[in-house]
Amino acid sequence: MRNVGKGRMRGVPGLVVFVAMLLGEVRGDAGVGKRVGEGVPVRTDFGVVPAMAKVEGELSLEKAVEIALRQNPDVARALKDIQRAQGQIVEARADALPRVAMTASFDYTDPELRFSSLAPGASVLGGFNRASNSLIHYQNKQWRVELGVRQNVYSGGRITAQREVARIARDEAYYALRATIDRTISAVRVMYSRVLAARAMVEVSEEAVRLADEQLSNATSRFNAGTVPRFNVLRAEVEVANVKPALIRSKNEYLILRLELAKLLGLTPSMDGGALLRCSGELPDVSGAPDLSAAVQLARARRPDLKQQRERILSEKESIKVALAGKKPTVEVNGGLRMQRDAWDIDTEIHGWFFGVTGQWNLFDGMLSDGRAAQARARMDSARIAYDDLVRQAELEVQKAYADMQQARETVTSQKKNVEQALEALRLAKERLSAGAGTQLEVLDAQVALTRARTNELQGRSDFARAQAEFDRATAADTVFDDGFKDPLAVLEKKVLSANVPLRSEVPKLAPVPGSGGGK
């Protein structure tokens, strides 16, 4: 297999994607047995799905992606598809190589069966045929050993085209692996951001409960002092009861998302319903917008699914040559050494060399080759149509992710100021109530407004993180591969990258993981 290179991840700071390790498995290297973090056993054989691993303590985004690339079953299946394609290359190459075979045979025939072939009225006595007045040489034992070599000399271009089809199939499998890696990284980033958002939502709900408890405590104190009626206490108790369901739901959502992340990473959550997995860091802040036009061009040049479809077009083109080879002659040579028993002397062995040439030309095959060629042309045209559709789909995905990022960016920007204003409004409402100039309703309304503002900002950050992950997947910007073979769109990719325009939003650094030496 040609050098399919190695990759490094740019979407998650400080993380080296283990693509080289994965592709090393395809080339037959030994399975990786290192550990990625304390208490995180990783799979060492991609051919067998191991028992689920466990992870305890904090889990960074970098480590989550690393574990997913090692243990995700989709990645393992894509690796096996490359190995299968490599086997197809060996199979296609076999027709171009000489075939050496040794054959041996031994036959024993009952003498009575030999005698039954004599003419009617003839008799056999001591090996003498009285009817013909001649000796009969019958042998009921025969043996033969032959060592032969056969070689295709000309096959009308069929063998060469089949080898090219197999080589292209391997490249398709490689691009399919790249697409799987990109999807896996994006899925981990999205799920990780959802876990962080759920954790932050728990904090917002806990703050709402805390504010409601403070208001209840304040109302109770004022009631005991005789400055407010019983209604204020009851209203505060109702507010506490109203905000608790949101906290319960947010905690349950946080638990479920951690379990789903564990499933995505191939990890085992605790069996008692709790999740040992805890994600570190915070949701990223919004950043500057990338250049949409350059990002679309980069997606056209770099997307592995587009590369895979281009290879499929070339494969169908070679399939046409395979089909038309049926209308051309084929030539094969053969030779070898043969040893066998002498036909007249049972104790004598004779041997010698033989050589031959065999040619065949189907002058008319019932239009079989033409029919196969027509099918291959139709498949090639269909692959071209599918490629054009994939290009439009890729452009749509980039534009949609870009629009989602813009929406989330505007939402977060608007809600940042709103949270500041809601905090100030709550402070003033409390001061007015303490001074006797305000009402309890003003404080409760200010608390609800603050919770809503923080929820909107949090939702905007979560939406931005998901849109950012999708944008990077749509432009294939999460990974960079050093291909060992020529890519027809490599020139376009270099042109886009050298234009010095922003192609993706900058991902901020994550918070350090305790005991890991800090994030990068």
Image: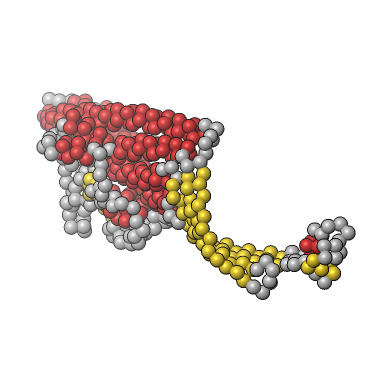
- Which of the 4 image quadrants contains residue 145? bottom right
Q: Position of residue 423 (x, y in %)?
A: 14, 32
Query: What residue do we see at 13% from left, 30% from top?
Result: 417
Query: What residue do we see at 45% from left, 33% from top?
Result: 373
How many marks overall? 0
- Please give left or right for residue 61 compared with residue 120 in the image: left
Q: Name above or below for residue 308 compared with residue 80.
A: above
Tell me if residue 415 can be seen.
Answer: no
Query: What residue do we see at 63% from left, 63% from top?
Result: 105
- Which of the 4 image quadrants contains residue 419? top left
Q: Residue furthest right?
A: 121
Q: Position of residue 456 (x, y in %)?
A: 23, 30
Query: What residue do we see at 17% from left, 40% from top?
Result: 494
Residue 77 or residue 495, whichever sits in front = 495
Q: Position of residue 5 (x, y in %)?
A: 26, 51
Q: Position of residue 492 (x, y in %)?
A: 19, 36
- Please give left or right for residue 90 compared with residue 182 in the image: right
Residue 370 or residue 473, whichever sits in front = 370
Q: Residue furthest bottom?
A: 347
Q: Name above or below for residue 445 compared with residue 287.
A: above
Tell me if residue 334 can be seen.
Answer: yes
Q: Name above or below for residue 254 compared with residue 118.
A: above
Residue 493 or residue 161, whichever sits in front = 161
- Which of the 4 image quadrants contains residue 200? top left
